[in-house]
Image (tube, rainbow, N blue to C red):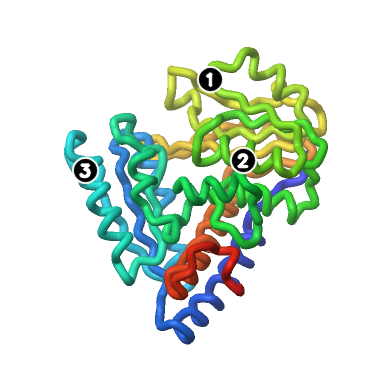
Amino acid sequence: MAVWIRGDKLHEETRRWAAEHVKRLEERYGVTPKLAAVLLNDDPVELETQRKYVSLKAKDVRSVGGEVEVYELYREPPERREAAALRLIERLNKADDVTGVLVQKPLPPYINEARLFEALSPVKDVDGLTPENKKRLVAGFDLDRDVLPCTPAGILELFRQYGIEVRGKDVAVVGKGALVGFPLAVMLMQLDATVTALHALSKDRTYYTRNADIVISAVGRPPELYRDNPWRLTSDMIKEGAVVVGVGGKVDPTAKRWYFDVDEESVARKASYLTPNIGGVGLATRARLLKNLIITTYMVATQTASPRLLAL
């Protein structure tokens, strides 16, 4: 049976760290971390999933003494939604009380994603998705100091905590999205892993997953909810002793039930290490968001352009 890669210890340690820094920020600068979360996607599955994610992130921020405001722009008509988002981002960039902005992904296909993240201030970008923050990641990231995409950074922190070495390993990353798959592949390559990035058009994805030392599944298209390009990783798709990380998960808006990328029961019998569908990567992602928010709050409070110039 696999060793479970659980995120609860990392999450709790980060919460304690963040709570201490909230007090320090208030004492030194009179600033309280405040997260603005923007919801734009009105697809029923995506909306239900994003509402759940944002509610958990908001709970974390409030638990350490921070503040949260959620903007439900998915209520805007599709033809006006992008313009409304750009106006809101401009306002949040200028708002003195807002120290972090989260534009929850994925966005609807009719919204120009690049335009939104070009407009967002990199100082307030808690997901590391603005061009400036992407450049810093590609140039060579610092796991402890940089504002990095939350899930990839959370996974690497879990690997560090559990002593899982990626250097020289064959890693299959299933999914190439801008939020998880693509930045994670870049980060793993910088750590000297041999990375294969797989996606819907890849030929015979299972050939690569069966030969990988580490398999990271970040698709989010469970067969129960999607007929077009569904995905689930099962035990016959990995080799004996592989490390398996499950990222993708979606909520059925009718049943209010989660469905995940990884068949946890079968994979656990064959993998050496495995993240549980509940209590694994999700907690690590939430921990990293807290860390990123503290970093952006210091940047706002001290008017510092780069996290590497901060003395945390």
Q: Name the residue: 27% across, 55% down.
A: 90
Residue 261: image location, x then y, percent: 56, 32
Residue nearest the viewer, comparing 147 with 9? 147
Count the labels in the image.
Answer: 3
Residue 241: image location, x then y, percent: 82, 33
Assess disc 1: are there few (<14), some (14-19) or many (≥20) residues with their C-alpha within 10 Å of its C-alpha.
some
Q: Earlier in the sequence, mark 3 or mark 1?
A: 3
Q: Secondary structure at mark 3?
A: helix
Q: Which residue is mark 2?
A: 184
Q: Which residue is mark 1?
A: 200
Q: Quadrant of residue 262?
A: top right
Q: Which mark is residue 95?
A: none
Q: Which residue is mark 3?
A: 83
Q: Earlier in the sequence, mark 3 or mark 2?
A: 3
- Real-space CA distance between mark 1 and mark 2, rounded to the nearest whole angstrom: 17 Å
Q: Relative to residue 85, is residue 286 drawn left or right?
A: right
Residue nearest the viewer, comparing 295 with 72? 295
Residue 298: image location, x then y, percent: 49, 71
Residue 282 shows in this picture: no
Above or below: residue 27 compared with residue 49: below
Above or below: residue 146 compared with residue 278: below
